[in-house]
Image (cartoon, rainbow, N blue to C red):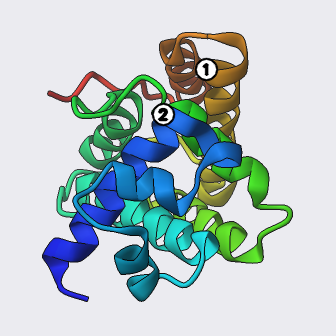
Amino acid sequence: MNTETADEIIAATYRALCEHGYADLTMQCIADESSMTTAAIHYHFDTKKELLNAFLQHIIDQFEQQLPHDASDPRERLASFLTTIFTPASTREDDFPIALMELKAQAPYQEIYRERLHDMDEKMQAIVTSAVRDGIDAGYFDDADPEMVARFVVTSINGGHVREVALAEDPNETRQMIETYLELQLGWTPEVVA
């Protein structure tokens, strides 16, 4: 499948998922959001499950491209990571957090979705673990278990997403909690990275 076709299908899936939610999402809904027919979409993806797996992979790839990999200063990597997590993309529709939550809710039943979400979780934990370990080694952070700090941060991010969708809680409350935790564990509070 060429990139342009894939991008169109993924973009249409995004819009249709935001508009209809997981339960009401059909290939016809996706086709209605694109210039393609359902037959053309089925040519590339046999099932909705295959398409949503590709959609999740696309979201993960986009997310990973936004994450800080090159900053040599571990404080900058960790602060940039939090900024990436807690700064909503300007192109996101308001219903995307709900649509993502619906996909997460399918993970216990759809191993393919669970695998994608697990990949994303592992990538986030690896970034935090690496930044914390490097920060401890450089003397920027107090001694702590980098893996445990990363697990807490990523678990808080995931829990914050639930609170944002289910309780309409401002995601900045989760960010403040994580920053307080980092100050207590590492003796460091991130500054906002522009």
Please state which of the two labelled residues, at mark 1 or mark 2, is closer to the viewer: 2
Label 1: state its secondary structure.
Answer: helix
> In the rendered view, does 154 fall on the left or right side of 85?
right
Which amino acid is tagged 1?
Glu
Which amino acid is tagged 2?
Glu
> In the rendered view, does 182 fall on the left or right side of 88?
right
Quarter containing the C terminus: top left
Asked whether 143 or 45 is in front, the reply is 45
Asked whether 165 or 148 is in front, the reply is 165
Q: Residue at x 53, y 10 (%)?
A: 170
In terms of sequence position, does the residue under pointer 1 or pointer 2 come before the other? Answer: 2
> In the rendered view, does 23 fall on the left or right side of 28?
right
Q: Quadrant of residue 59?
A: bottom left
Q: Residues within 10 Å of mark 2 (few under 14, many from 20)?
A: some
Q: Position of residue 26 (x, y in %)?
A: 57, 56
Instruction: Please give the residue where the numbered disc 2 appears in the rendered image.
Output: 19
Q: Residue at x 61, y 10 (%)?
A: 169
Q: Position of residue 51 (x, y in %)?
A: 50, 72
Q: Position of residue 171 (x, y in %)?
A: 52, 19
> In the rendered view, does 85 fall on the left or right side of 3?
right
Instruction: Please give the residue where the numbered disc 1 appears in the rendered image.
Output: 164
Q: How many marks?
A: 2
Please determine whether, in this image, residue 95 is positioned above or below residue 84. above
**Residue 154: mark in rendering:** none
Q: Residues within 10 Å of mark 1 (few under 14, many from 20)?
A: some
Q: Quadrant of residue 89?
A: top left
Q: Report the Cα–Cα distance between label 1 and label 2.
A: 18 Å
Q: Is residue 123 visible?
A: no
Q: Residue at x 25, y 42 (%)?
A: 76
Quarter containing the N terminus: bottom left
